[in-house]
Image (cartoon, rainbow, N blue to C red):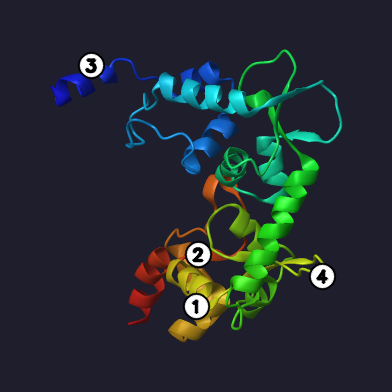
Amino acid sequence: MFWARRIAEIATLVGPPEMQGAIGATKAQLRSLRDDGVLVPRIAKSKIKSLWRIADGLDLLRELDALAVSFSEGMDGWEDIQSASKRKRLRVGDIIGAVRQAELTLGRITGTTGYRFLAVKKSEINEMAQHLAQSRFHNRDASNDIPASAFARSIGMRSEGWFQSLFEAGHVSAAWMQHPVTNVRILYVSDEDIAAFNRRFLTLPQMQLEFGLHQHTCAARLRAAGVAPFSPNGQDFGSLFERTKVETVVRITRT
């Protein structure tokens, strides 16, 4: 009976565009809901296109609608959940969690339907971000942390904002630390963050130290082997290489 129900359910599942249409969300909004576990696909395998059960999305929408107050379009002080998440670097899941706990006011533009028209108050989002920053500042053991920019310089990457771009693209780990008095936000890396970076990536100066070859020699060997710098979706991160690709060329040719 269990498998019979699951097989019957598969025929009712839909892909992302249909789920977006059903709940009135953009592609980015649905992705954030999924990434933060607010909406969970019925099928976890990414190669299957029809992952979603529309009823799950409609249940979430009804729950949020019941918590929302109405406000007039164009009224100052409100922003949609996705914009709030991006502006203050808060997880959508944390914002919705705070709404559920009545810690944030949820609103909906009068006369609209759909997730994209749900909004939160900017002032409350600012307070939430401030509170989380203070909590991280006091609770994180940052005794050995260093600014990400200093780490980047130490491995030969001196372009301003280089590590931050890598972090915001989701390729490395780090943490924003905001001083509770000055409110200055700085991206820091811990020993664990640095170790994780070194397990995955190498810069040319790092190759010189690790393999005992001049970085120009390393670069020439990588070019000859057709190994290009790390550049997902065409993003330019300079002379940064994936360790697995480097080791198969530089380490082997050195021995």
**Tag 1 secondary structure:** helix
Question: Label 4 is placed on what type of residue?
Answer: Val
Q: Residues within 10 Å of mark 3 (few under 14, many from 20)?
A: few
To which residue does mark 3 refer?
A: 8
Mark 1 or 3: the one toward you: 3
Corner quadrant of residue 102:
top right
Q: Residues within 10 Å of mark 2 (few under 14, many from 20)?
A: many
Q: Residues within 10 Å of mark 4 (few under 14, many from 20)?
A: few
To which residue does mark 2 refer?
A: 241
Q: Earlier in the sequence, mark 1 or mark 3?
A: 3
**Tag 2 secondary structure:** strand
Q: Position of residue 6 (x, y in %)?
A: 22, 23
Q: Position of residue 208 (x, y in %)?
A: 52, 82
Above or below residue 118? Residue 209 is below
Question: Label 2 is placed on what type of residue?
Answer: Phe
Residue at 68 percent across and 41 percent down: it is 104
